[in-house]
Image (cartoon, helix red, strand yellow):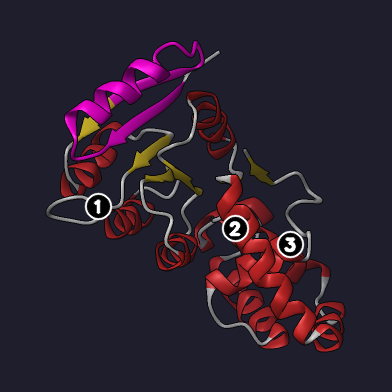
């Protein structure tokens, strides 16, 4: 079976070496490159086309969030996992907003990191357990505050809009959704706009939180936690 190719992006050499050592013990994962800053991460992703990029946030020249954004725009097939020492809510919001595959805290074990890489390579989303709990709690508060309104809005979604919502929550770009559903990018954009209007949510981060709290991606086995 073809191994999952991984690019490591971290400005600390010792961290990259440690991650490489841990991942090289996994028979189904292959580290194909290392980047010491955000710009190099974007460049190497374009050249090597890894299945997954494991990216730190605090990076020189180009921070990890912006580097991830550029990678996802340039190479939509590549999935980006953020691995950071900082689990600030603002960072998590940004990561979800750009469509990254997940967010892990650096204290994460090698076993969990390997699992996250495998899940990301399948197109799934993966968050550290503490971040996952925060996402669920935050969205639940929102849902509790307007439960009736949310239920009526969700009930108004068409089957196709529900599909689009799930794919958005899984971090898929419009081009990927179009290919997955066999429709045009323009049609995807129309469905996306309609569901945003029906739910009253106008950003990707909000849609993702809604899908997580409503169990839309959990019920389909798409959302994983350590």
Horizontal side of residue 73 vs 166, given as left or right? left
Q: Position of residue 8 (x, y in %)?
A: 30, 33
Helix or strand or loop: what does disc 3 sit on?
helix
In this rendering, the answer to whether 27 lies above or below 112 is above
Residue at coordinates 75% horizontally, 44% vertically from top-left? 221
CB under 8 Å between callouts 1 and 2?
Answer: no
Labels 1, 3: front one: 1
Q: Residues within 10 Å of mark 3 (few under 14, many from 20)?
A: some
Labels 1, 2: front one: 1
Checking the image for residue 203, the label placed there is none
Mark 1 → mark 3, Cα distance in angstroms: 34 Å
| 1 or 2: tag closer to the N-terminus | 1
Residue at coordinates 58% horizontally, 43% vertically from top-left? 123
Residue at coordinates 17% horizontally, 38% vertically from top-left? 36
Mark 1 → mark 2, Cα distance in angstroms: 30 Å
Write down the quadrant of residue 128 in the picture.
top right
Helix or strand or loop: what does disc 1 sit on?
loop
Q: Nearer the viewer, residue 84 or 96?
A: 84
Instruction: List the residue tagged with mark 2.
Output: 177
Q: What stretch is highlighted in magenta?
A: 4-32
Q: Where is residue 42 in the image (x, y as percent from the top left)?
A: 24, 46
Checking the image for residue 58, the label placed there is 1
Q: Position of residue 135 (x, y in %)?
A: 61, 62
Instruction: List the residue tagged with mark 3.
Output: 163
In this rendering, the answer to whether 81 lies above or below 144 is above
């Amino acid at each position: 079976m073809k191994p999952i190719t991984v690019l490591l992006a971290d400005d600390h050499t010792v961290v990259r070496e440690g991650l490489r050592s841990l991942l090289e013990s996994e028979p189904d994962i292959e580290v194909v490159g290392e980047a010491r800053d955000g710009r190099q991460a974007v460049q190497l992703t374009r050249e090597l086309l890894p299945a997954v990029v494991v990216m730190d946030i605090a990076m020189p020249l180009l921070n990890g969030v912006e580097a991830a954004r550029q990678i996802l725009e340039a190479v939509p097939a590549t999935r980006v996992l953020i691995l950071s020492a900082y689990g600030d809510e603002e960072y998590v919001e940004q990561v979800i907003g750009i469509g990254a595959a997940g967010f892990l805290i650096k204290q994460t074990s090698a076993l969990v990191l390997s699992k996250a890489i495998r899940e990301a390579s399948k197109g799934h989303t993966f968050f550290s357990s503490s971040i996952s709990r925060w996402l669920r709690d935050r969205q639940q508060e929102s849902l509790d505050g307007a439960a009736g309104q949310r239920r009526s809005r969700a009930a108004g979604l068409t089957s196709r809009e529900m599909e689009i919502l799930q794919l958005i929550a899984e971090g898929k770009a419009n081009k990927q959704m179009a290919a997955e559903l066999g429709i045009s990018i323009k049609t995807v954009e129309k469905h996306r706009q309609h569901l945003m209007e029906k739910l009253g949510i106008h950003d990707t981060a909000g849609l993702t939180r809604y899908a997580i709290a409503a169990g839309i991606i959990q019920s389909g086995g798409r959302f994983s936690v350590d």
